[in-house]
Amino acid sequence: MNRSLLFMVLVVATAGCARTAPAAATETPVATLISAPAQAALEVTPTLAAPSTALPATAMAATVDTPTPTDTPTPTLTATATITATATRPRPVGTLIVPKAKPTATKAAVVQTFKYNAPELIEPHAGDTRVAPKDDLVFKWKPRADLSAGECYQITIWIINVVDQRYSPFSQIVNGSCGSAQSTGIQQFILNRPKFSPPNYGGLIGDAERFTPTSEFKARWWVRVTREDGSPLSPPSAQFEFTLQSP
């Protein structure tokens, strides 16, 4: 009995082992048998090979950075050459000296349009002295020719304040000179003393010293031939300037 019982136990045990053998045959993956730190180390190992693969990229980057034309641009050299060429390019002197102006012949033609030459002044001479209100101002000049009807002598006089250079102008067609047949002799005009009948120079002195009172003035005068409406028939004469004292 004991042997039979033992045999049966062995048979049952053997059968149990046979049934559980497939479960034992299933192998646990290696990854589950390796501890977490070790597995991390194994996973890092492929990453360590990155430098070897990155070296070509480094070489390429160095290759890209190698050309440096942008640090020394050629346009600067081109600009310098252009400036030098412009500075050394010769310019004709004539274009800088000779302006485009009206030809001299045109000016001469304008002068020739006058019918008469300028009158010739006699007195008061330049540098003479007259005293106000003692003296009348008597102006004399030589006639140029026999004047036709409507042609006259026009006299212009400035009374000038010598301190501030303010001046009072006077201009008038000389009475009795229009159509004058006097081609020789003397023509004259009188500017009366102050407080005498006009024309007189009292008002001219007053205007000249309105802002700066003074006792000394200059009188400047000239004559020309004009029509009665004032249009010129001759150039103006020379200008004579004399002293007019006002004590």
Image (cartoon, rainbow, N blue to C red):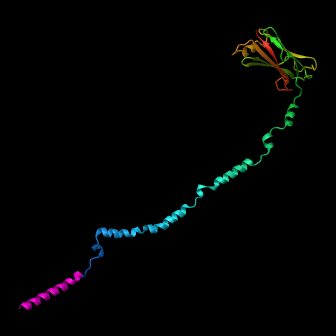
200 left or right of 50 in image: right
Q: Quadrant of the C terminus?
A: top right
In x, y percent, where is residue 103? 84, 38
In x, y percent, where is residue 33? 27, 74
In x, y percent, where is residue 41? 34, 68
Q: Residue at x 11, y 87 (%)?
A: 9
- Establish if 88 lies above or below 182: below
- Establish if 18 lies above or below 212: below
Q: Residue at x 30, y 75 (%)?
A: 30
Q: Quadrant of residue 215?
A: top right
Which of the two residues, 95 or 198, is positioned nearer the viewer here? 95
47 left or right of 59 in image: left
121 left or right of 45 in image: right
Report the magenta stretch's main SS: helix
Res. 199 visible in picture: no
Q: Is residue 23 magenta?
A: yes
153 left or right of 47 in image: right
Q: Residue at x 45, y 68 (%)?
A: 52
Q: Which residues are magenta?
A: 1-24
Q: Residue at x 16, y 87 (%)?
A: 14
Which of the two residues, 220 or 227, is positioned nearer the viewer here? 220
Q: Is residue 119 magenta?
A: no
